[in-house]
Amino acid sequence: MKSFVISAATDAGVNIDGAKEGALKLGKYLENKNLEVIYIHESKNFIKNKDPLNLRKNENEINKINENIYNEIIKKKNEFPLLIGGDHATSIGSILASNTIHDNIGIIWFDAHPDYNTFETTITGNIHGLPLATVTGFGNKDLAQFNQGKFVKKENTVIIGARSIDKKELENLKRAGIKIFTTEDIKKRGIKNICEEAIKIASCNTLGIHISYDLDIIDPTFAPGVSVKEDNGISYDEAIMGATLLVSDINKITSIDLVEFNPLNDISDKTYSLATKILDIMLEKISSKN
Ligand SMILES: [Mn+2]
């Protein structure tokens, strides 16, 4: 299947700089592999707000970028979209577009953080902590006003690798009934078993699965180049195996994100080379998709 890449060069969703440069660097890598890369940039005169007391930081800019991502994917609805972040707030555009195109998809959220805050529960006001709640229609719809379709069903949404959950965020997750596999679960049951169960949950009565891969799921020993590091993450091998397992039945997969690469925090290009390895695995599968 023909694919295209959206490089969402923004880190407006987090008060730490660098994910913008990550999108450009991985975009360049994919361009050099002869893929079509559409770059989406922040507005020319946009100045990022980092005020800790502002709990709706950069909301308008994030909405503009997500609307652009959404429209680009809808326009090319017969091609496979691969979104490169940028911070994780950019997944709002990609997931809602895929769910509009395919009517009803599930989500596998591969991430150290559930990103299930709302404007009411966020402590930081960094919108990259709100995307999963947004796309499942939990809380208000301020970050999804461009959406023409439905929201993703909560029962088809599954989180893998979560190990840093805010107190009120956990209440949101419980109320919504979202299935969570923690890093502990991965250690106990193995990454293969967890990925297989996640695929079952996300594909039950849906027409496809969206995979959202946040590099901070990986332990900082192997992937220090992210904005918000969390210790006790998955290993290098589990990161590769996870990517491989999630796309193993590629005909089920409608769309993929790889987000939160931050080259300003990287050490000796460790995260960059792991990210490109993950991308290669996914792209090989995508090209074999019907
Ligand atoms: Mn995330």
Image (cartoon, rainbow, N blue to C red):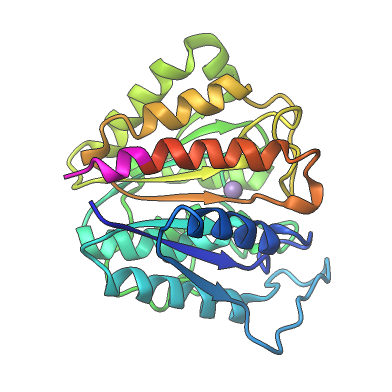
Residue 51 horizontal/vertical position (percent): 83, 71
Residue 112 figure quarter? top right
Q: Is residue 45 magenta?
A: no
Residue 268, by quadrant, is: top right
Is residue 113 depicted above or below 101 in this figure? above
From the viewer's side, name the closer residue of 273 and 199. 273
**How many labels were placed on the picture?**
0
Quick check: 155 left or right of 187? Answer: left
Q: Is residue 112 in view from this perspective?
A: no
Question: Which residue is located at x 59 percent, y 18 percent?
Answer: 184
For this orientation, the residue located farthest to the top is 188
Quadrant showing the C terminus: top left
- Which picture quadrant has residue 234? top right
Q: From the top left corner, tell me how far across and down residue 165 is, in percent.
A: 65, 39
Instruction: Decide if residue 224 is on the left or right side of residue 107.
Output: right
Let me know if residue 287 is in the magenta part. Answer: yes
The residue shown at (31%, 31%) is 199
Please name the residue shown 58% across and 54% down the image: 26
**Residue 72 left/right relative to 56:** left
Q: Is residue 18 above or below residue 207?
A: below
Q: Nearer the viewer, residue 6 or 134?
A: 6
Q: Which residues fall within the magenta stretch?
A: 284-290
At x 42% / y 57%, what residue is drawn? 34
Residue 190 picture location, percent across and down = 48, 13
